[in-house]
Amino acid sequence: MADEYLPALEALILNFKRLPGIGHKTAARMAFALLDFTHEEAHSFADAIITAKESIVPCEICGHISEGGKCDVCSSDKRDRSVICVVEDSRAVMALEKVREFKGLYHVLGGTISPMNGIGPDELNIKSLLARLDGVEEVIIATNPTIEGETTAMYVSKLLKPLGVKTTRLAYGVPVGGDLEYSDEVTLFRAIEGRRDI
Amino acid sequence: MADEYLPALEALILNFKRLPGIGHKTAARMAFALLDFTHEEAHSFADAIITAKESIVPCEICGHISEGGKCDVCSSDKRDRSVICVVEDSRAVMALEKVREFKGLYHVLGGTISPMNGIGPDELNIKSLLARLDGVEEVIIATNPTIEGETTAMYVSKLLKPLGVKTTRLAYGVPVGGDLEYSDEVTLFRAIEGRRDI
């Protein structure tokens, strides 16, 4: 049937559809674009996938992406080892590192508690966090400001409290450059609640 | 530097950025998602790229994607060989085949005339179209309704006219299900111009 894709093209489309936010039409567009790649470009792409997948592993200490052993942050001697910032994933580490404000270490949970998706605390790197609190004075919980992120923050903070380590959470508020008119009510409520003297 | 990507991740991001409509942020999101693929999924993805690239080649007659030799349309004995529909790319063939209305053959130009991008008539499969007009009664030009598509349609039709083959163009008009209020002026003008008796 001419109105169906060739099997090799169909297989490629299915692989693109596994990526986040990619539906069938976008996947098909990408697959067709890939057919226009040169032989070298296609091989470069395939090699990059395999190389990234095989060479990038979680840091043995914090779970952030690394090329084996410790990640760049954990192996740096310029970081403040008394503060750990707990995040959901490596993308959050990258985002925080861009700010160049935080000089402590990280701990990557690898997701959030999400009963709907069958992810409980045991599926996250929480035990390894508790095992590295020696000499740590503060744990900043920087999970995303979503329901799952909030639930996870509460869960982790409840585990940390009895251990006597100071636990903080990123400030909520209106985003800089944003417009109050377009801020949702919960954010505005949190912004008022967390107001500070000027 | 912890605020830069690992080389293997950077390479993967650069490859994703080669795809149409993918900027740096989306490419990074895809690359991180790929790190969460299983070993098998990553290899399946890389294999699909190589397999598609190596097994899918242009049909030797019309230029539509094929697995070697003739494409499904050209090799079918149920198609009307007296009509050829000229399109920009294989995606257009797929779109037209879904309609199940057109029973003729196709000719894939492989793009449009676009001096800005250094693409002239010689870069397109136009000569091969002129070489297959034996027994053809009508050529329907179905390039996209863009400036480049229009320019290409004009160019091809001027080549076809002296050869005595009937040349037609897809109808312009308001899209079915669309709202006149949101149609641009050129489309509305063409819709009025091309009005038909009811």
Image (cartoon, coloured by chain):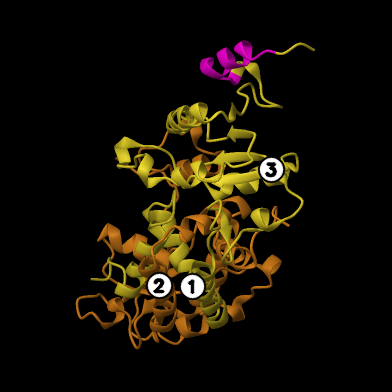
Chain colours: A orange, B yellow
Q: State the SS at label 1.
A: helix
Amino acid type assigned to the residue bearing label 2 in the image: His
Which residue is denoted by mark 3 in the rendering? B104
Q: Do dots 1 and 2 share one subunit?
A: no
Amino acid type assigned to the residue bearing label 1 in the image: Ile
Which residue is denoted by mark 1 in the rendering? B50
Disc 3, disc 1: CB below 8 Å?
Answer: no
Going 60% across and 68% down the picture, which residue do you hit?
A: A8
- Residue at the left extreme? A78
CA gap, disc 1 and disc 2: 7 Å
- Specify the quadrant of the image occupied by residue A2: bottom right
Which residue is denoted by mark 2 in the rendering? A43
> Up-down: is B19 above or below B122?
below
Residue B171 belongs to magenta span: no
Q: Chain of mark 3?
A: B
Q: State the SS at label 3.
A: loop
* Percent x, y of residue A37: 41, 61
* Closer mark to the observer between disc 3 and disc 1: 3
Disc 3, disc 2: CB below 8 Å?
Answer: no
Stretch of the chain drawn in magenta: B182-195
Crowd rating for badge 1 (residues with CA inside 10 Å; few <14, some 14–19, many 20+)? many
